[in-house]
Amino acid sequence: MAKTINLGVLGIDHGHIFDMLDEMFKAGCSCDYFWTEGSPLTLDEFNKKYPQIKRVDKKSDILNDDEIDMILISSIPKDRANLSIDSLKAGKDVMVDKPGCTTLDQLNNLKKTVKETGKIWSINFSERFHVAAVAKAEKLVAEGKIGKVKQTMGTGPHRQGNYERPDWFYDRDSYGGIITDIGSHQIHQFLVFTNSNEAKVNHALVENTTKKEFAGFQDFGEVNLTGNGGHGYIRLDWFTPDALPTWGDGRLFILGDKGFIEIRKYTDLAKSKKGNHLFLANNDDVKYVDCSDVTLPYFSNLINDVLNRTETACSQELTYLSMELAIKAQELAEKK
């Protein structure tokens, strides 16, 4: 049996912790303990789904456990950087839910700690790493199927829903703003598909249309970027209508000089409630690809990185740049 790793969990405030754990379990990992602050809305579901994972009273019980190799973090966004730093200093590698941090000061402290410890700080950009159609698109682009990528257009629609939300969901400093939070997904994919390792934010905007009673809430945002490999446009919202069979009709358009790809991540509107649809058009063909059986490489690659001290799941510099641009775009939008 292939070697694997033992996990610990710090913070379960965001429901992404379920997908993070599930994918790592599929890859062969184990997890015995979690810690979280207070009683987040996810707690009952977490205990029901993972009765084998026992709650500890102090986060130090996990940080000081020599049997734990990696920490998974899905706390309130503003707390993720400090929990990551504590984990790194305790000799643990980290997979943290996006956004991995909410300020540039936090990001700079994380960079310093990673350099000092030599440990991995990986952000779970789920709209890339959990979407098989995106994995397939990466292969097609690498094979030159659409030539040189010139632009990406990514949408990040979400549903507010009529269910209970925690107080931090509406507090700007807690969740980081709509671009830092959900926009970091699309900024990350822009960098990946344009093969950019430098970029600037040309335009950024945020608005609150539906929840005026919450001054810190933002339900719309857009960003325009230019990288040294191409261009990017991003649209974000919390406007998903109730009739849609999923939380958001996330799309990604990848334009090359010899063709283009469209990804319908979570649904094919009015046709299929399933996700992972890919459409390819180039000089040789126009076709549809069902990507539901495509393997997700991030999780097994990350485990191998932890075991072998490699960098195959996602480069550390790309992780840093994704958050740096997201936070700078957020700051630019809020200056207007």
Image (cartoon, helix red, strand yellow):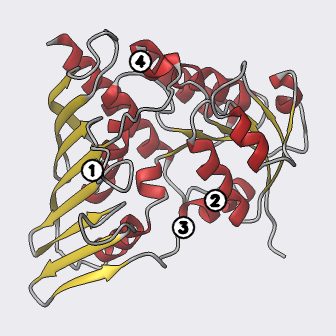
State the image coordinates of residue 49 (x, y, percent, origin top left): 74, 49
Q: Which mark is residue 170?
A: 4
Q: Identify which amino acid the numbered label 1 is placed on.
A: Phe
Residue 158 location (% of width, % of height): 34, 41
Figure check: 197 above or below 193: above
Mark 2 to mark 1 CA distance (whole Å): 24 Å
Q: Secondary structure at mark 4?
A: helix
Q: Which residue is mark 2?
A: 23
Q: Are marks 3 and 2 in contact (CB under 8 Å)?
A: no
Q: Which mark is residue 93?
A: none
Residue reaching furthest to the bottom = 284
Q: Distance between the Cα atoms at labels 1 and 3?
A: 19 Å
- Of the residues shown, which amino acid type is indicated by label 4? Tyr
Disc number lying in front (4 or 3) = 4
Side (left or right) of 173 relative to 21: left
User: Which of marks 2 and 3 precedes in the sequence?
Assistant: 2
Mark 4 closeness class: few <14, some 14–19, many ≥20 residues within 10 Å? some
Nearest to N terminus: mark 4 or mark 3: 4
Q: Is residue 137 above or below residue 175?
A: below
Q: Residue 190 shows which numbered tag?
A: 1
